[in-house]
Image (cartoon, rainbow, N blue to C red):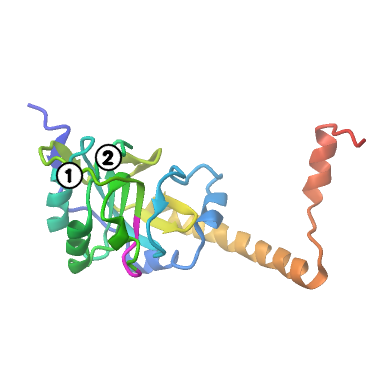
Amino acid sequence: MSKVGCRIRTDFERPSRELIEKFKDIPVANLDDCMNRISAIDENIRPINNSKILGPAFTIKVPEGDNLMFHKAMDIAKPGDIIVIDAGGTTKRAIFGELMVNYCMIRGIGGIIVDGSLRDVDFISKLVDFPVYAKGITPNGPYKNGPGEINTDVVVGGQVVSPGDIVIGDGDGVLFIKPYEAEEILERVQKVQQIEAEIMDKIKNDKTYIRPWMDKKLEEIACDYI
């Protein structure tokens, strides 16, 4: 009998901390620009507090409004892991709240992202060292019946994420990077940041914003000046 939909993978290969830390100070917007501007998750999944998120993805898939697999995941995730929960995008029931967040913090988990709802937002929103992202907020609690999956490919905010993908999030949003693509993306983003620094320097010091592409595009689309 197939166990698809009810299975737990207890461990997986994580990228090195050295590789992950290379993304520490890079804005998500710059990264998304270097990934053809289609890689960020749904804009409705927002940060609940002001902490940035960075670490390897520990993925969970749960039925709508159920958190049995999240309870199990908290016991097997490793310090620094980012718990990424595919809750189907529904916001009718909270998948977790203050108790589970405190347990995650005690265990050294690096943060939580849920494509669904949470509760106890008055507590979670005040945390300064534990990032949490969610699609919604509701006082309605979850069921604990299962099934679900731990550490399989899931879809969160319209983006596929696999266990061990690098999770990066700030005030703009979140995206996931495959470890084998990380160095290439880093090389691209460094070039983008250098160009943007030069543009900003001209804006501040010369009060100019040079955009040769602008008039070229207007000419290309045959814009009429009246």
Question: Which labelled disc corresponds to residue 97?
Answer: none
Left or right, residue 127 beside residue 67: right
Q: Position of residue 103 (x, y in %)?
A: 17, 62
Question: Which labelled disc corresponds to residue 67?
Answer: 1
**Nearer to us in this view, 201 or 165:** 201
- Vertical comparison of 5 with 192: above or below: above
Check disc 2 and give the amino acid type. Answer: Ala
On the image, numbered disc 2 is attached to which residue?
Answer: 87
Magenta stretch: dominant secondary structure: loop
Say if residue 78 shows up in the picture. Answer: no
Identify the residue at the far right of this view. Answer: 226
- Label 1 Cα crowd, 10 Å radius (few <14 / some 14-19 / many 20+): many
Which residue is depicted at the point 85% across and 32% down? 222
Q: Is residue 129 magenta?
A: yes
Left or right, residue 186 beside residue 123: right
Which residue is depicted at the point 37% across and 55% down? 167
**Nearer to us in this view, 63 or 56:** 63
Check disc 1 and give the amino acid type. Answer: Asn
Which residue is depicted at the point 79% across and 46% down? 214
Mark with earlier residue (1, 2): 1
- Label 2 Cα crowd, 10 Å radius (few <14 / some 14-19 / many 20+): many
Q: Position of residue 87 (x, y in %)?
A: 27, 40
The quadrant where residue 160 appears: top left
